[in-house]
Structures are given as structure tokens and as C-alpha cells.
Amino acid sequence: MAKTAPVRSIQKVWKSEPTIEGAGVHLKRAFGFRELPQFDPFLLLDDFRSDIPADYLAGFPWHPHRGIETITYVLDGDVEHEDSLGNGGVISSGDIQWMTAGSGILHQEMPKGNKAGAMVGFQLWANLPAAQKMMDPRYRDVKSGTVPVVQQPGGVEVRVVAGMVGGVQGPVKDIVIDPEYLDVTVPAHAQWEHPVRPDHSVFAYVIDGEGYFEPGRDAFAHESVGLNYFDMKVPCVCPNHTLVLYGPGQSVQVATQGRPVRFLLVSGRPLKEPIAWYGPIVMNTRAELRQAFEEFEKGTFVKKAGERA
């Protein structure tokens, strides 16, 4: 009889925290600079869900990026964008924009919400390895209709942005960190197990309902640890806005009781490289970081073909 792959246990779990970014956008940060390097190769995850237009309409006016990829996933509402390369458009409900900043790009993102004034979206930052920090910038605009939805046993539904589920490949491919990005819904009284690369960092972020994110769950454990808890040793139910960082293993297991759960499941190959990060620019050394900001001040930040290292 074949052995079952070791299921990953929770390493840490906590709630996303309110913060203000851009020109005054109120959002919730699941993880960021202070959690380095626990999520390597990922740097930051922001949750910009709100039904109050004043929370998001100020947006993210023109700003630079270098050395990273930004992944914007919109579930409801519109985000208008444009950049220094002449690209522009709208990221709408169900769309994904996977932007590789590479050697440098200037862009702006302006959330507009839906007709009712609600905005539902997430932005993830992924690091680039030193060898690709100065690669050509590029976009992958993925429209909602091109993202496959896989139905699995027990009524589980998986939207596959990147990676593979049940033999179905997501539309985002050929990314340096070999990521998996899934939008998973597990109905009430169901269980889902999914294989993951044992050498990859893996995390889940709950965006609706509640669930148990490792075997051996205890329905009452959460009452003793409260809403903001770190280095959790006892399995507990994880509600909306909860970030789960997994330890080692070859699969993840999620179960529900009386309520369904919806979450993002993300994994990627760790880079294990030094990080020099300030604002929207992430390099490997402080000298590279200083050079980037000097170029930004001089107006030489955006490189033309042949100018990139």
C-alpha cells in the first residue's frame, strides 16, 4: 500500500492588520517587511476589500517598482491602470494582472469599485532572483474567462490561476519562482487535500467563511488563543482575514464543519538570497537599492532595450 504524503502542519497563523498605503488607501496587510524571510519568495500580501469608496478611491498614483513581480487579483469591482511603457486598461471582476517589474517600471493603479461602491481584491508581491532582477518588464493580463475552474470531490471548487489541479493547468506559466496560485472553496462538512512541492513555501489566506487548515482539528481551540495569535501550537478554526503559514510537508489538508471556507492557496520556490528592500523597490544589496533611487531621481530609472544589465 502506498504511503500517504506527509500533510503539512501550521507553522504560524495570524490575522491581517489595518494599514494605509498609496495616496490613502485603507487596506489590510496579511504579511510584509516585518515577516521577512518567512514567506520567501513572497514579500507582501495586501487585502483591499471594502464597501466604502472613500477607503480606496485615492488609489496608488504613479510610483516605481524594480526587482519584483506584483500580482493583482480582483474579485469584484474595477481597477484602472497605466504605466511608463504605454500600457493601460482595466482589471475587472475575476481578472488577474501578473506584472514583472524587472529592471524598472512606473505605473499607477486606481481602484474604482463596482456599481454598488464595493471593491474586492488582493495584491501579492513576489521577489525576483538576482539573475532576473534587471530583466525586461512584462505584463500578463489574465481575463476571468480564461481561468479554469476545477470541480473536485465533495463539492470543492478550485480556480486555477497558476499551477495545476486535477491535470488542469492555470493560464499563468513560465514564472521564475514556479508558483501555484489557487482560489479554493470548500463547502460545509467537507475535506480537501492537495499535493504541494515539498521544497516550496506555502501559505493560505482566508477570504470568506472558516475552516481547519491541518489534521487533528479542535473546534474549541480558537476560544483560548483569541483573534491575533502567533506560533500557534494547537489546531483551530481559521476565520476570514486569517493568514496560515505552513511548515514542511508534501500536501495540505483543509476541512470544514458547519460553514464553508474560501481561501487563496499560494506556493513558490524560495530564493534564499539576501534582500534589500525600501518602499516599492527590492534588490539584493543596499548599493543596488541606492542606485535604483538615484536613477529614479535622475529620470533614468526606466531602461530602454540594451540598457538593462
Image (cartoon, rainbow, N blue to C red):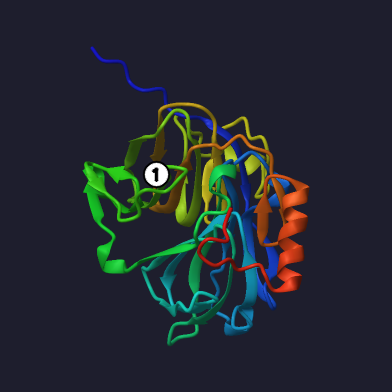
Q: Is residue 223 left or right of residue 257?
A: right
Q: How many marks?
A: 1
Q: Is residue 208 left or right of residue 146?
A: right
**Which amino acid type is marked by label 1?**
Thr
Q: Residue at x 54, y 69 (%)?
A: 49
* Picture quadrant where residue 241 is located: bottom right
Q: Residue at x 46, y 46 (%)?
A: 266
> Does residue 241 appear in the picture of this structure?
no
Residue placed most toward the observer, 102 or 73: 102
Residue placed most toward the observer, 41 or 102: 102
Which secondary structure lies at badge 1?
loop
* Picture quadrant where residue 272 is located: top right
Which residue in the structure is indicated by mark 1? Answer: 256
Residue placed most toward the observer, 9 or 283: 283
> Does residue 143 appear in the picture of this structure?
yes
Answer above or below: position of 93 versus 37.
below
Answer above or below: position of 234 versus 131.
above
Q: Position of residue 120 (x, y in %)?
A: 48, 71
Answer above or below: position of 30 versus 269.
below
Q: Residue at x 54, y 30 (%)?
A: 247
Extreme-top residue of the structure: 1
Q: Residues within 10 Å of mark 1 (few under 14, many from 20)?
A: many
Q: Residue at x 66, y 53 (%)?
A: 282
Extreme-front residue of the structure: 306
Q: Position of residue 154 (x, y in %)?
A: 24, 44
Q: Position of residue 194 (x, y in %)?
A: 34, 37
Quadrant the N terminus occupies: top left
Q: Position of residue 98 (x, y in %)?
A: 44, 61
